[in-house]
Image (cartoon, rainbow, N blue to C red):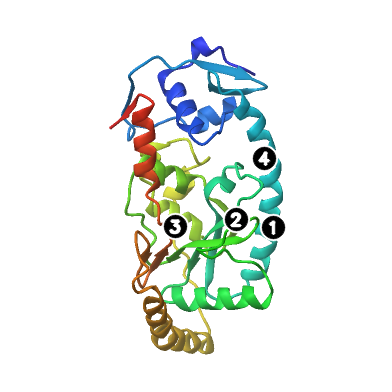
Amino acid sequence: MLISSRKLSLQDKFTIFYHSLFSFPLRVKEIKRWQPGKGIKFGFKKAILISSSRGFYFIKGEEKQVGERLKREEFSENKIKIAKKYSEVLKFLPFIKFIGITGSLAMGNADFYSDIDLLIITKKRTLWTTRLLVLLFLKFKKISVRRSFDKEVKDKLCLNMWLDEEDLEWHDRNLFSAHEIAQIVPIFNREKTYERFIFLNSWIFDFWPNAIPNKERFFKYNELKKQERFLNKLFYFCISNFVEPLSYFLEKLYMRGKITREIVSRKRAIFHPVDWNKKLMRELKRRGVVVG
C-alpha cells in the first residue's frame, strides 16, 4: 500500500533521501524500519520532493533507481546463497563464533560485479590464528578471496572485518556505522555471539530505533557459560598463548608501511581504507541536507 507523498513526515523524507544516496528506493515497511532516531539531528535547506512507483519511494526524478534495485535484489539473492554455502564450510573451524553478511549485500543491494563482504567474530585471543586458518582453508578449498589489488571481484569473499569476542564495542558512533551494524545479516551464530554484539552496540538504536525487529531481546541477553573438556582447554591455551602472538606478529610485519585507515590490533582487524561516514556527510551537505 502506497502512502501519499503529501502525508510523508520529515523523518520519512530524510529516510528516503538518505537511502537514495545508495540508489536504494524504499518500500513502505522499509521507511518504517529506517526511521531516524534522536541521535540524528537533520534539516533540509530546500524542499525535498518525493515520488513513488511500483511500491517504492524515491527522490523525484530518480525513478530509474527502482529498476536498478529490482535487478540488484536478484543479484543479491544469488550472492547470499554463495555466502551461506561458504559459511557452511567455515563454521567447522573451531574458533569462529559468528559470520555475518555486511555492506550492500546485507541490504539486498549488491550489483552484478560486487564481492561478498563478511564480518567474522572469533573466540577471544584467537583472531589472527583464526584468520590465518580461514585463509589457508579457503585456498585449499579453491574458494576465491578478494585481495586489495584485485580488479575482478565478482562473488569473491571480502573478509575485511574481524573482531575478537572480547572487543565487540564499536568505537566510531555515527549514523553510517550504526546503519552498517543494524543491517548485518547473521548466517552463523554460536553461543549468542550476535546477541552480545548488538547488546554491546545498543547505541545504534539512538540512530535507527526500528532497524532490528524485537530489539528487546538484546537487552535480556545473558552470556552462556560453557564447560570445556581438559583437552580443549589445553589446545586453546597453546593457541592463544603461543600461536596467536606469532600470527599477529607476522601480520604486523606484513602490513608495515601499508596501513592507511586500516585497523590492525590484537583484537580487531578492519580493512576499510575509505572513511565512508566522512564521504557521506560531504554528499549530504552538497545536496542541501544538514546533519548534526
Do the CB atoms of the residues marked 2 and 1 lie less than 8 Å apart?
yes
Mark 2 vs mark 1, CA separation in Å: 9 Å
Which residue carries the number 2 mark?
A: 116
Q: Residues within 10 Å of mark 4 (few under 14, many from 20)?
A: some
Q: Residues within 10 Å of mark 1 (few under 14, many from 20)?
A: some
- Describe residue 188's horizontal placement relative to residue 245 as left or right: right
Q: Name the residue located 36 percent from the left edge and 16 percent from the top edge.
A: 46
Residue 82 circle label: 1
Mark 4 vs mark 3, CA separation in Å: 29 Å
Mark 3 vs mark 2, CA separation in Å: 24 Å
Can residue 182 be seen in the rendering of this structure?
yes
Outermost residue, top side: 6
Do the CB atoms of the residues marked 3 and 1 lie less than 8 Å apart?
no
**Which quadrant, please, contains the N terminus?**
top right
Q: Name the residue located 37 percent from the left edge and 79 percent from the top edge.
A: 253
Residue 196 circle label: 3
**For discs 4 and 3, the disc positioned in front in the rendered view:** 4
Please report whichever mark, 3 or 2, sits nearer to the chain's N-terminal start: 2
Do the CB atoms of the residues marked 3 and 2 lie less than 8 Å apart?
no
Camera-nearest residue between 252 and 202 = 252
Q: Residues within 10 Å of mark 2 (few under 14, many from 20)?
A: many
Which residue carries the number 4 mark?
A: 73
Q: What secondary structure is marked by label 3? A: helix
Q: What secondary structure is marked by label 2? A: strand
The kind of residue on which mark 1 rests is Ile
Q: Name the residue located 58 percent from the left edge and 25 percent from the top edge.
A: 28
